[in-house]
Image (tube, helix red, strand yellow):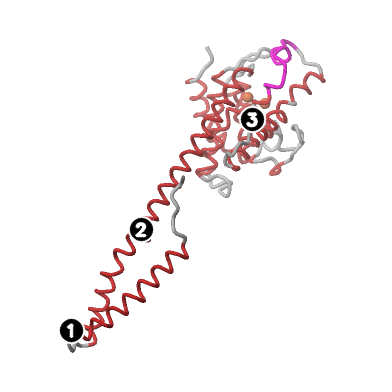
Amino acid sequence: MPAQHPSLLKISLTLIATIFIGEGLIMLILPLLGPMSVTATALLDATLLAVIMIPVVILRVLNPAKESIAALKKAKFKAYAREDHMLSVLNTLALVKDNETGTHIIRTQKYVALLAYRLREMGQYLDCLDDEFIVRIIKVAPLHDLGKVGISDQLLNKLGQLTDSEREIINGHALIGESILAAANLNIDDDFMATAIHVAGAHHEKWDGSGYPRNLRGNEIPLAGRIMAVADVYDALVTERPYKKPWTHEQAVEEIIKNKGIAFDPIVTEAFVLEQDHFKEVLEQYRDN
Ligand SMILES: [Fe+2]
Ligand SMILES: [Fe+2]
């Protein structure tokens, strides 16, 4: 059973009552001490009131406040632990089915961190990019392709050209990912889940409105999706896939710049340009075997 803490009203009433009773007692005591100057009376009054108030403030204000802060910290810690647990379950699910490698997940998570911190350094999207948002987007980045659990292995691993209907089925992974996350929303912080849903559902949207699943355009696309898009595409370009050879880092940078304001948010693209050397470092550090 959690400890019950006195309400602000109770605390206020206790303090008022203590001052009232304390002052009454002091007024009774002071005349017994004989004649004194006004200054001495005021000083003695203040000192006696402080002596009466200090233990009351400690017992009725400071101690309960400390307990409340400790209880809040504990609740927050429990919420984080629950989020981490939920994340690791979903991550495992995503990895089991993902036709891409585990290093793709690690690299894209690191690219997302580079872009988010750089955007903040550039003074962009500051209304969104507080510490909590950045921690959240880094944590949920590995879930961007979670929806692939709903697509058959045969189709995901198909070599060669996909038909239009096959492409459409694969594109469905964005909405499937969103639905899984919405259904998994078990008492987890709303902002956390919203960021996960944005990453999974909007990482294939394009700035000019030609992306999927909703053809969102410009700032209609959640920022988490716009950041994830650049990270995901860079990694797809520079790594080998069943249907393509890896591009060089320089070719990938050129391609992303070419798509500034077309596929990608122009400001996120600028952040990418400034971070390109760090992207290359991440790629080299976490190369696929
Ligand atoms: Fe995807
Ligand atoms: Fe991906």
Three-letter code, disc 2: Leu
SS type, badge 3: helix
Residue where numbered disc 3 is placed? 256
The answer to whether residue 47 is left or right of residue 13 is: left
* Residue farthest along the front direction in this orientation: 1
First-in-chain label (1 vs 2): 1
The answer to whether residue 264 is left or right of residue 286 is: right
* Cα–Cα span, label 1 and label 2: 33 Å
First-in-chain label (1 vs 3): 1
Q: Residue at 74% across / 39% down in the picture?
A: 216
* Cα–Cα span, label 1 and label 3: 86 Å
SS type, badge 1: helix
Three-letter code, disc 1: Leu
45 vs 262, nearest the viewer: 45
46 vs 174, nearest the viewer: 46
Residue where numbered disc 1 is placed? 33
Q: Is residue 195 magenta?
A: no
Region rendered in magenta: 148-160
Are the two marked residues, 1 and 3, in contact with CB atoms closer than 8 angstroms? no
**Above or below for 35 versus 24:** below
| Coordinates of residue 21 in the picture (x, y in percent) | 34, 75
Please tell me in which quarter of the rendered image ligand 1 is found.
top right
* Cα–Cα span, label 3 and label 2: 56 Å
Q: On the image, which quarter does residue 184 sit in?
A: top right
First-in-chain label (3 vs 2): 2
Q: Is residue 150 magenta?
A: yes
